[in-house]
Image: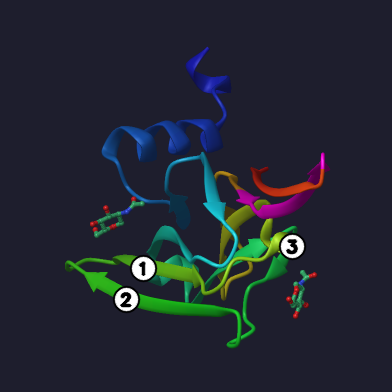
C-alpha cells in the first residue's frame, strides 16, 4: 500500500533514479595482480563524495586493514576533480615502490567522511613472484635452476 511504503525506501529509490550521489562511494575494478619481487606496482582508487554530506574526506589504501603510509615503502599521489555542484572526485594512486614477499595479500581502498560515514572498494589481490635459486649437483657437474614461484 502506498501509505505504508517506507519513506526511507522511497527516498533511496528517488536517489538511485535521479543518480544523486548519497554521501560517498569508492570505484575501481577488483582484480589479481602478479608482480615480481623488486619491481613496483600502483593501486588506483577513485572516490566520489558529496561535499555537503561527507565533509572532509580521507581516502587511503589498506593492506589487511592497515593504512599504507610508510614513505619509505609507498608513494601516494592525490588529485581532486570538481565539476560544479557538491560532487567531488578524488583519485588516490598508491605505488608500492619495491615489492617484497610481505606485499602479497589483499588490498582495499577506504574513503572516510568527516561525518563518520565510510565506504570501501573491491579487493585487489597482489601476488608476489620471486626467484629462488636451486643448486642441482649431479656427476661432478653443478648447474643452477631459477624457479619462478
Ligand atoms: C579514475 O578517474 C579518472 C579521472 O576521472 C579516470 O581517468 C580513471 O580511469 C579512473 N580510474 C579508475 C580505476 O576507475
Ligand atoms: C615488510 O618488510 C619490510 C622490510 O622488507 C618491513 O619494513 C615491513 O614492516 C614489513 N611489512 C609488513 C606488513 O610486515
Residue 142, relative to residue 91: is it above or below? above
The reply to whether discs 2 and 3 touch (Cβ–Cβ < 8 Å) is no
Q: Which residue position is annotated with label 3?
A: 102
Question: Mark 1 or mark 3, which is nearer to you?
Answer: 3
Task: Pick the residue in front: 117 or 125.
Answer: 125
Q: Is residue 55 visible?
A: yes
Residue 71, relative to residue 34: is it above or below? below
Residue 5 spot, x, y in % from top left:
54, 23
**Left or right of 31, for residue 99:** right
Residue 128, relative to residue 1: is it above or below? below
The reply to whether discs 1 and 3 touch (Cβ–Cβ < 8 Å) is no
Q: Is residue 56 visible?
A: no
Ligand 2 within 8 Å of the CB at mark 3: yes
- The residue at the far bottom in this view is 71
Determine the CA span between mark 2 and mark 1.
6 Å
Determine the CA span between mark 2 and mark 3.
28 Å
Q: Which residue position is annotated with label 1?
A: 90
Q: Which residue position is annotated with label 2?
A: 79
Q: Residues within 10 Å of mark 1 (few under 14, many from 20)?
A: many
> Which label's residue is closer to the chain start, 2 or 3?
2
Principal secondary structure, stretch drawn in magenta? strand
Q: Residues within 10 Å of mark 3 (few under 14, many from 20)?
A: few
- The residue at the far left in this view is 83
The reply to whether discs 2 and 1 touch (Cβ–Cβ < 8 Å) is yes
Question: Mark 2 or mark 3, which is nearer to you?
Answer: 3
Residue 142 spot, x, y in % from top left:
75, 50
Q: Residues within 10 Å of mark 2 (few under 14, many from 20)?
A: few
Determine the CA span between mark 1 and mark 3.
28 Å
Q: Which residues are magenta?
A: 127-139
Q: Is residue 12 magenta?
A: no
Colouring used for the render: rainbow
Task: Pick the residue in front: 66 or 148.
Answer: 148
Amino acid at each position: 500500500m502506498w501509505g505504508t511504503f517506507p519513506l526511507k525506501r522511497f527516498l533511496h529509490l528517488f536517489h538511485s533514479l535521479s543518480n544523486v550521489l548519497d554521501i560517498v562511494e569508492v570505484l575501481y575494478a577488483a582484480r589479481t595482480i602478479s608482480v615480481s619481487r623488486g619491481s613496483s606496482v600502483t593501486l588506483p582508487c577513485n572516490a566520489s563524495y558529496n561535499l555537503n554530506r561527507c565533509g572532509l574526506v580521507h581516502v587511503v589504501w589498506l593492506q589487511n586493514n592497515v593504512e599504507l603510509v610508510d614513505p619509505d615503502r609507498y608513494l601516494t599521489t592525490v588529485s581532486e576533480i570538481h565539476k560544479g555542484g557538491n560532487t567531488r572526485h578524488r583519485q588516490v594512486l598508491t605505488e608500492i615502490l619495491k615489492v617484497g614477499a610481505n606485499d602479497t595479500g589483499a588490498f582495499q581502498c577506504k574513503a572516510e567522511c568527516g561525518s563518520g560515514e565510510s565506504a570501501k572498494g573491491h579487493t585487489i589481490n597482489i601476488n608476489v613472484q620471486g626467484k629462488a635459486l636451486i643448486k642441482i649437483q649431479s656427476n661432478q657437474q653443478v648447474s643452477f635452476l631459477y624457479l619462478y614461484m
